[in-house]
Structures are given as C-alpha cells and as structure tokens.
Amino acid sequence: MEQVTSNVVVQPVDKAKIRGIWKVALILFLITVIEYAFAFTMDAGMLRTVIFVGLTIVKAWFIVSEFMHLGHEVKGLIYSIILPMVFILWLIVALVNMEGAAIKDARGIVDVEQPATEHVGGEEH
Amino acid sequence: MATTATVNKKSLWGGGIAPFKASYGKLMMWFFLLSDAFTFSGLLITYAFLRWSAPAYKGDPEAFTFSTEYWPIPEKVYEAFPGLHGVEAPLYFVGLMTFILILSSVTMVLAVEAGHRMDKKGVVKWMLWTIIGGFAFLSCQAWEWSHFISGTDIATIGDVVKNGIWVENYEIIGANLSFNQYGPPAFAALFFFITGFHGFHVFSGVLINVIIFFNAASGMYERRGHYEMVEKVGLYWHFVDLVWVFVFTFFYLI
C-alpha cells in the first residue's frame, strides 16, 4: 500500500500571501483595541452597543472572508452561507431590541438608580 | 418523440460538475458550521433577551455594587487577573484570551497555507502552534471559571434557595447554577452555559487538531497527495474564533 513519496515537490513560500495573512491579524487586533478604547472612555448606552455590534460584524467579516476563505469562493456558496445568517441577525435585533424591552414594560420592571448597600466584608472567606 | 433529449454540457446544475467548486467534505463542514451558528445564535438571543428584560443599573458606574436585584456591569465582574489579587484590571484577562484565540487562528491559516504548498514541515509546525494556542485559551478559561465560581472578598446579601430551603439574607459568595453574587441567577447560568458551550467547542477543536497534527506528521496527507483535511479542520477552528468574537462582545463589552 505504501506509495512513492519521494516525488513530492514543496512549493516555495509566497511572501506576499504570508504578509496578507498577518495584515488581517493586525486589523483584527486593531479593531479589538478600538473596542477597548470605547469600553473605557464611553458610557454604556444604545450608541455604544451599536458601535460594539458593528465592530464585531466587521471582525466577523474579516475572519469569514479571509481566514475561512469564503470571500474567494463561488458566489452561490457565499450566498448560501451569508443569507441565512442575515435573517438570523434580523431575528436577533427584533428579539433583543423590541421583545426584550416590551417584556420588561409588560412586567413592570423598572431600572435601579441607587447601588445596593447590603454587602458584608468576608475576610474569613 | 419528435424532440430528443439533449444534454446541455454547460448546465451548471445538470450534474457531473461541482457548481460550488468545493469538495463534498468542505461543503458539509460549511453547512455544519451554519447549523452550529444557529445554535450559538439561539444562545446569544436568549442571553440578550433575558438581559434586556431584566432591571438595569442606571446609577453612577463608580458607585456600582453587586446585587441580585439588577443586572451587573460586565467590566465590574470580569476585572481579575492571575497574580493580581485586589487589583482592578477590567477586561484585561479576557482581552488576553481574545488575543490568544486570534493568534491561534492565524497559525491555523499558516498551516493551511503550508498544506497548499505540500510543505509537511510547515503544516506540522503551525498545527503545533495552533494546538498550543488552543490549550492556552482553555487554561485561561479554566482560571476564569474557577475565579468566577469562588467569587470575590465581599459577599452580596440576597434571598436564595439553598438545598431546597428558602434562605433570607444569605451571604452569597461566588456563583453556581442556582444563585450568584454578581447579579440575578440567570446571569451566572448564562455565563456557565454559553462560555461553557464555546469552551467545549474549543476543547473538541483542540482534540481534532491533535489528530490532524499526528496524521500530518506521519505523512498520511503527503501520501494522499493533498492537505484538504487541514483546510476542513481549519474552517472549524476559525468558526470557534468567530463565535468567541461574538461572545466577547455580548458578554464582556455590552
């Protein structure tokens, strides 16, 4: 069963391709740094949430299209993967933004303005 | 009978050719990943729905303290770093974890690239780095879980059900599936379930990577004439990274 393996030819490294891979890695790293900058400097709110989700989708796009190579596949394959996910994203936005808030209203849940004070120091723990 | 059936040789979907120009194995991996993405979407939808229908803390972030009455600010929960007890390092550790996973994704791309060139040594080297990255991430997660479970120095007072008995004003330290010191019970339950489910994917990924590493090292793919298995496993590994990008945003940033 052992086949001849001596005629395997190792192709030379394409430097530009390797650089491209590291460039995508750098972009992902930089986007994460930007996310941290927003996390530390901006107060929580709808706008910050939208920024985070937007940057996450940019990151996801780079991973899927470059690392997973989907950007270089046939159009039909791209659409058969991306279209279902677009509908899922729609569902996420609908459930989070509208249903979550609607259920909160319906249950009469109110936000808390003052921090809770019932705490004990637990040196013995 | 007047017309005879003619086969259009150029028909894309007429059979005999691969319309997606991808092998069966790679296509099935894509569709498996799509179904897995649905599963994770379901989990994240549940998280977001429960979170946005729970009471939020609208006061001064500086004065924030944990309570079972409202959802916690994530960066107040995840602010520990190994070896820095009592030091507030919000999100630093999870940033490190993100960095490790992205790097191990890069080494996986490099392994696939080496496979395209039939470079056995390159595949073996980069697969090994990918496995090391996977183990590093799992170790970080183990530390994070154990810290999350054992809790901080200050107890939160809350009413809990402990061993089937209703206990009022219980000093809650740490977290389990029934109650936790950080916020409503659902907070820790979702943390365990979602990061746990992702961690399980990473764990399976590392196991599969190890198998592929040994196959590549023993020359199996060289004899086969191609390294497509590395590509397929690479797809799975990138997907794990992709899910983490979303878990990171929804759990730790928002």
Image: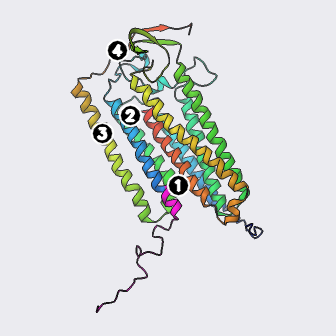
Residue labelled with disc 3: A95
Magenta residues span B1-29
Q: Quadrant of residue B80?
A: top right
Is residue B20 magenta-colored? yes
Residue placed most toward the observer, B26 or A88: B26
Q: Is residue B35 above or below residue B6?
A: above
Closer to the eye: label 4 or 2: 2
Real-space CA distance between mark 2 and mark 1, rounded to the nearest whole angstrom: 27 Å
Query: What chain letter is assigned to the residue under label 1?
Result: A
Query: What chain letter is assigned to the residue under label 3?
Result: A
Residue type, mark 1 in image: Met
Image location (x, y in percent) of residue B163: 43, 15
Real-space CA distance between mark 3 and mark 2, rounded to the nearest whole angstrom: 11 Å
Side of A99 relative to A47 (left or right): left
Side of A109 relative to B211 (left or right): left
Side of B45 relative to A73 (left or right): left
Q: Residue, x 48% and y 58% (percent of image)?
A: B28
Q: Quadrant of residue B218?
A: bottom right
Residue labelled with disc 2: B47
Element marked by disc 3? helix
Real-space CA distance between mark 4 and mark 2, rounded to the nearest whole angstrom: 24 Å
Residue labelled with disc 1: A68
Image location (x, y in percent) of residue B24: 51, 63
Residue labelled with disc 4: A114
- The lab-note entry on whether marks 2 and 1 share a chain reads no
Real-space CA distance between mark 1 and mark 3, rounded to the nearest whole angstrom: 29 Å
- Quadrant housing the N terminus of chain A: bottom right
